[in-house]
Structures are given as C-alpha cells and as structure tokens.
Image (cartoon, rainbow, N blue to C red):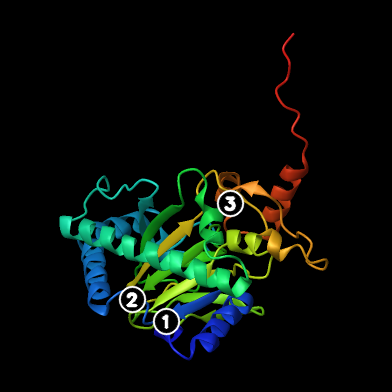
Amino acid sequence: MEKLNGEERAATMENMKDACENWGFFELVNHGISPEFMDTVERLTKEHYRKCMEQRFKEMMAGKGLEAVQSDVNDLDWESTFFLRHLPDSNIAEVPDLEDEYRKTMKEFAAKLEKLAEHLLDLLCENLGLEKGYLKKAFYGSKGPNFGTKVSNYPPCPQPDLIKGLRAHTDAGGIILLFQDDKVSGLQLLKDGEWVDVPPMRHSIVINLGDQLEVITNGKYKSVMHRVIAQTDGNRMSLASFYNPGSDAVIYPASKLTERGENKELYPKFVFEDYMKLYSGLKFQAKEPRFEAMKAMENTPNLGPIAIV
C-alpha cells in the first residue's frame, strides 16, 4: 500500500481494480499495521486457543464420531470459532475466558482494521468513479456499520478429504479483512471453475469482497466462492473481520453505475438485515438464487395493514 503514495499509485490502483473485477480477493502488505503488533495478536490468539478451546474442540468432535467417518461430511465444518462484535456495540468485555491483555489487544486491532476498511472503501470508490465516502455512507444505516471479527482455528483433521475446514460460500456482507496463519495454508478461492490457493504471506491482510459490494457496484465487482481445506497437521489461525452494512441500511446499485443505457440495474434493492435472514439458511449455496429471492420480495406489492372491521 505504500506505493499509493508515490509514482506507482496509478499502477497499484489498476492492480486493485483488476483484483476486484476478476478475482474478488487481493492480499495487502505495508498496510500500516505494524508487524510487531500483528505478532502479538497472533501469539495471544494461539495461546487462547490452546488454553481455552483446544480440549473442548477435541471432545466435541470425538462426541460426534468424526474421527472415524467414512464418507463426505456436508453439514458441519472442522473449525473452532468465537465471534467478537465491535460496531455498533462491542461485546469484547462480555466474551468469557479472554485474558485482559487479549481483550485490550483485540480492541486495538479492531480500531486499526476499521480505519483500514474505510480507507479501502474510499480507494474502491476512486476506482469505480464514485464520490469519496459513497460506500461508507451506503453501509451506514441509522446506527453505523456492523463490524465484527470471527476468530477461528482449524486444528489438524484426520480426514481432510471427507471434512472441509469451512465449506464453500461467498460472504454476505461488505468488505472482509483477514489476518491468516503464515505457516499453515488452507484457504482457497474459486477462479474460472478451479480452486486456487490463497498463499499464507507473513504480516499480510487478505481482502475479499462480499455480496453487498457486488450489488452496489451492479456486478462490476464480484463476491467469490471460497473455502478452507482442513489439514492433517498444523493448526491454522484465521481472524476474519467483517465490515458490513448497518442492519437497516438499504442496499441497491449505485445510480452512477447504472445510468448509462447498457448498464441497467441488474440487482435488487433491499434492507441488509432481510438479506442476512435469507443468507443464514442458504450460506453454503450459490448467491444468485439469494439475489433472485430479494428481487421477488422487492417486486411483491406492499398491501399495507389489513383493515379490521
């Protein structure tokens, strides 16, 4: 990202544009979050997993009989997770079993990622020809964006060919910032019908675009299917932070991207919370039927309250 401040700015912006249009993913380095701070986040996350979650995960998976499965498992993922909410209200103080240092560090990490997410949204606006601040405003709703971090560990799996670390899906929300393990791989994205590894790179932040950015850009940028492959050895850490629209934000294609004749509106208009209700039951299915369902809801006439005589 330091190249954005010099003569390579145009080429770097072009790289980002290509990534958003053709990959839905890109990897950021020199993003302004210090390597030393990221090392602290990683150390504390791995310590917390070992102390508080590892044994629980082993017992749970043993209880489900997954050590000895013989066929594909399609209804669960080989992952140990918990969720930290940052905006509009933080739950960090209430999450059990977190050491004070870890709470404080994650709060600081969230503030840095929030700033980075908003900077990235403005860079996307620049590439799209939208005014600065358009995407942040589109996400805002009445209480500001939803922002949270899914803290995941993907422990060694005895049957990685039968159980996924995380099944294939697109992300429902806005822009996702991932700090992933730099030693244990597993993340893959779907490109032209082939699964492609997203290589671990020390101190990088992997960015991917969610369904809402596909809608707002009228399909110019795409959310992309991705998955996590379980590994037989090594425990993979993943901190995925989701900068999403506010629950009552109304999402629709930006008029500037639909006003030219050939670019009619290809996506529906809906309230983000309604999309999330639909997504929660259909996460591991294709996104297109979700968009169609929202379009059908949009086209259903609102008859208003029924009069009681």
- Mark 2 secondary-structure assignment: loop
Q: Position of residue 254 (x, y in %)?
A: 66, 59
Q: Nearer the viewer, residue 250 or 123?
A: 123
- Number of other residues with Cα within 10 Å of mark 1, as a class: few under 14, some 14 to 19, many 20 or more: few
Tell me which numbered mark, 1 or 3, is placed earlier along the sequence. Answer: 1
Q: Nearer the viewer, mark 1 or mark 3?
A: 1
Q: What whole-number distance in Å separates the C-alpha atoms at marks 1 and 2?
A: 8 Å
Tell me: residue 278, above or below residue 39: above
Numbered circle sitting on residue 32: 2
Structural crowding at the residue carrying mark 2, measured as other residues with C-alpha within 10 Å and reported as few (<14), some (14–19) or many (≥20) = few
The reply to whether dot 1 and dot 3 touch (C-beta < 8 Å) is: no
Question: Going 55% across and 49% down the picture, which residue do you hit?
Answer: 280
Density class for disc 3 (Cα within 10 Å; few <14, some 14-19, many ≥20) is some
Q: Is residue 227 visible?
A: no
Upstream in sequence: badge 1 or badge 2: 1
Residue 279 tag number: 3
Residue at the disc numbered 1 = 1
- Amino acid tagged 1: Met
**49 or 256, which lies in front?**
256
Amino acid of disc 3: Tyr
Q: CA distance from mark 1 to mark 3?
A: 33 Å
| For residue 55, above or below residue 238 | above
Q: Are marks 1 and 2 in contact (CB under 8 Å)?
A: yes
Q: Nearer the viewer, residue 50 or 146?
A: 146
Query: Which element type, helix, strand or loop, lies under badge 1?
Result: loop
| Residue 173 appears in view | yes
| Chain-order first, disc 2 or disc 3 | 2
Image coordinates for residue 171, horizontal then vertical, percent: 54, 61
Quarter of the image containing the N terminus? bottom left
